[in-house]
Image (cartoon, coloured by chain):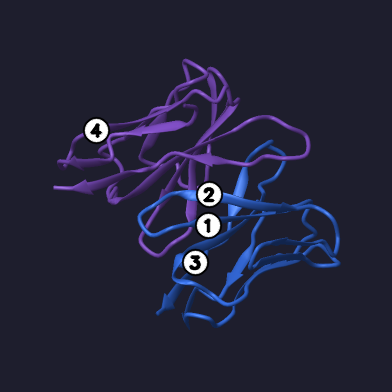
Amino acid sequence: DGGITQSPKYLFRKEGQNVTLSCEQNLNHDAMYWYRQDPGQGLRLIYYSQIVNDFQKGDIAEGYSVSREKKESFPLTVTSAQKNPTAFYLCASTIRRESQNIQYFGAGTRLSVL
Amino acid sequence: GQQVMQIPQYQHVQEGEDFTTYCNSSTTLSNIQWYKQRPGGHPVFLIQLVKSGEVKKQKRLTFQFGEAKKNSSLHITATQTTDVGTYFCAVAGGTSYGKLTFGQGTILTVHP
């Protein structure tokens, strides 16, 4: 069953703690993305990666870090430098096609601060 | 980067009424996509529009791309409670392939 798997579904962070959100895809997609969504808001791009071992900052990268060691995996670390991390985090992927760049999303991780 | 303005932010309708959300850009778009996010869920791709003046239909949903390729609309005829959710437009975000810039979304509530 192909798709994008995000884990955990819910995550709680203590002050000063780094936490890592997992995103795995078995769609053989080239590009992967991390978005942050606040209540009633749109999607804001945190980081994206078009190929393995390469990634770029999005619009709100401060306080976050990523890695792309494998095509299938794009974990996001929310560092202690992110002072307002409570949000819904969505991972997405897309295959490289000239005419289309449909993004497929995981089910998301809800992060809260204790 | 590419910017797109989506209105309205919220829309409350009675079941059976129509609904429309609009996306506007100050620059010409190569294409525009629409996504739906159910409450508590994740965005799901609905459609992509590419051609000037293009109109596509999916059952009660009608999607339009403006003649100047600077605006788009999603119209739902005779809303049902299953239509509730947030509708987003998304446009290509610059030269990086696959990168999208999403509109703020329109949150649709349907009262039975």
Residue on which disc 3 sits: B83
Please state, as top left, top right, bottom left or bottom right, where the C terminus of chain B lies in the image.
Answer: bottom left
Q: Give residue B36's mark.
A: 1
Q: Are marks 2 and 4 in contact (CB under 8 Å)?
A: no
**Mark in front: 3 vs 1:** 3
- Three-letter code, disc 2: Val
* Residue in the image at 50% along x and 73% along y: B9
Q: Quadrant of residue B98?
A: top right
Distance between the alpha carbons at the discs numbered 1 and 2: 5 Å
Q: Is disc 1 in contact with disc 2, using a CB cutoff of under 8 Å?
A: yes
x and y percent of residue A33 in the render? 51, 36
Per the image, the residue denoted by label 2 is: B44
Spot occupied by residue B95 in the image (x, y as percentages of width and height) = 72, 39
Task: Give the labeled residue for mark 4.
Answer: A18
- Confirm whether circles 4 and 1 share one chain: no
Q: CA distance from mark 2 to mark 3?
A: 13 Å
Q: Which chain is blue?
A: B
Depth check, mark 2 against mark 3: the one in front is 3
Secondary structure beneath dot 1 equals strand
Q: Position of residue A14 (x, y in %)?
A: 15, 41
Amino acid marked by disc 3: Asp
- Measure the C-alpha gap from mark 4 to mark 1: 32 Å
